[in-house]
Amino acid sequence: MTDSPEVQCGQVRVPLDYARPDGPQIPIAISRIRASGPESEHRGALLVNPGGPGGTGLDYAESKRAQLPDSVRRAYDIVGFDPRGVGRSAPVDCGPAGGLFEHPRPDPVPAGPAEERAYLDGLRRLADDCARGAGAELEHINTANTARDMDRIRNALGQPKLNYLGVSYGTYLGAAYAAEFPRRTGRMVLDSVVGPDQWHRFDVRQGFAMIRQRDVLFDWIAAHPEFGLGTDRDAVRAHYLAARDRLPAGELGADEFDRAVYRALSRTERWKPFAEALAHLLRTGDGAQLSAEDDRNYEAALRTVKCADSRRPTPAEVIGSVRALRAADPQPVLTGLEATTCAFWAPPRETPRFGHPAMPPVLLTQAEHDPTTPLDGALRMRDELPGSRIAVLDESYSHGAFASQRSACLDGTAARYLLTGELPGRDVRCAGPGLP
């Protein structure tokens, strides 16, 4: 947590199981930064969530606030929180997580029947470790309960309605809140929108989008010969595959490499550092620039929530999805397929709902070519939320649009809505930045 004197911290106690409101309670950690403007400009509190599932939100109140338009900072107290199961809010733990945190880790892409069986065995071990680590809390760490926690936060803040900014998974969470508490939903911006799918289906859609985005990245690298990785897509791909095959023994495995690729594909400002790291690896054999520290709680909460939210895919569905991605590209990036673990998870107790006839229309914001939360899912989620509008940042390839890519058009649209409550009369298209 930050030590800034601007940030106020506290807790809200909530039931672990809302069916037993007087039963065991857990803490939900919250942070707040007061609005900077005078009382005449004050619009209340704006709860923010950075996504995940598994993203910690305490520091996000400060970091996201710094990006918001000044008019929004003047009008709103910005409130962050760690969702249940995350950070300082009863964090879940998957222990060894079926080897997820071992280094180096083997190739995560199964290429034949024996490897497919091993792949499923690894998912089973991961699910078993999570069940042991989380214990009785496991079935209660889900989106529907986090939405109920958000309403407890609203009440603790003395707000008649919840004003909210959710990013990535935070959009899924906001849509679930609006379905559960439609008459308590205030002004809501859903940025970089998760589609209203079962989680495994969403993950697979994302996997195909990542393949498309990687081709765009290869073309971009080819247009920059200073990297020394080739001057056309095929040459760059050959260097990429060579690097993946020649990782430093005992230091970096194919799984860690693919995770670095996944991170790079999500935001274009990471493309140059990734290309430089790839060239450095091929030149020196040093892959340290591609390694990243594991966040054990994030990975545990990510899978716990996804598997608590959706029906289980069958093992045959899991392997069918992997084969479909391999048919599209022999070397797909499977990092985002976290809900494959759910094939060996207990069935969900409660799945989230989206949209309600009594909810107010809200604003969705989205980058056109976002590979992490693809546009088609955002459009389908908009259709679940009656009367809502979407502002799309054209020719943008990054995850995160509002107060993220410095678009006066998109940021202005969202800020006006948060300040006045007025949505645009129709969906908005804004000129985007193009490739870096």
Image: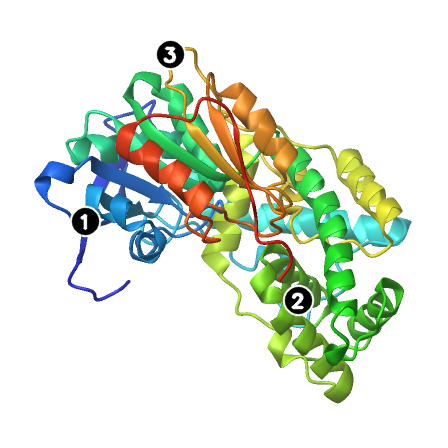
Check disc 3: other Cα within 10 Å, few if <14, some if 14-19, many if 20+.
some
Amino acid type of the residue that numbered disc 1 sits on in the rendered structure: Gly
Check disc 1: other Cα within 10 Å, few if <14, some if 14-19, many if 20+.
few
Amino acid type of the residue that numbered disc 3 sits on in the rendered structure: Ala
- Return the residue nearer the eye: 186 or 435: 435
Per the image, the residue denoted by label 2 is: 256
Is residue 68 shown above or below 191?
Answer: below
Residue 229 picture quarter? bottom right
- Return the residue nearer the eye: 148 or 190: 190
> Which element carries disc 1, helix, strand or loop?
strand
Identify the residue shown where x is 85% and y is 46%: 328
Q: Where is residue 43 in the image (x, y as percent from the top left)?
A: 20, 35
On the question of residue 173 being in view, the answer is yes
> Which element carries disc 2, helix, strand or loop?
helix
Q: Distance between the residues labelled 1 and 2?
A: 36 Å
Comes first in the chain, label 3 or label 2? 2
Q: Where is residue 258 in the image (x, y as percent from the top left)?
A: 70, 62
Mark 3 against mark 2, which lies toward the viewer? 3
**In the visual, does 194 lie left or right of 14?**
right
Q: How far apart are marks 3 and 2 (CA)?
A: 46 Å
Q: Distance between the residues labelled 3 and 1?
A: 32 Å
Comes first in the chain, label 3 or label 1? 1
Identify the residue shown where x is 78% and y is 70%: 244
Check disc 2: other Cα within 10 Å, few if <14, some if 14-19, many if 20+.
many
Q: Residue 210 bears which disc, if any? A: none
Q: Residue furthest top?
A: 357
Identify the residue shown where x is 73% and y is 63%: 220
Q: Residue furthest bottom?
A: 284
Per the image, the residue denoted by label 3 is: 358
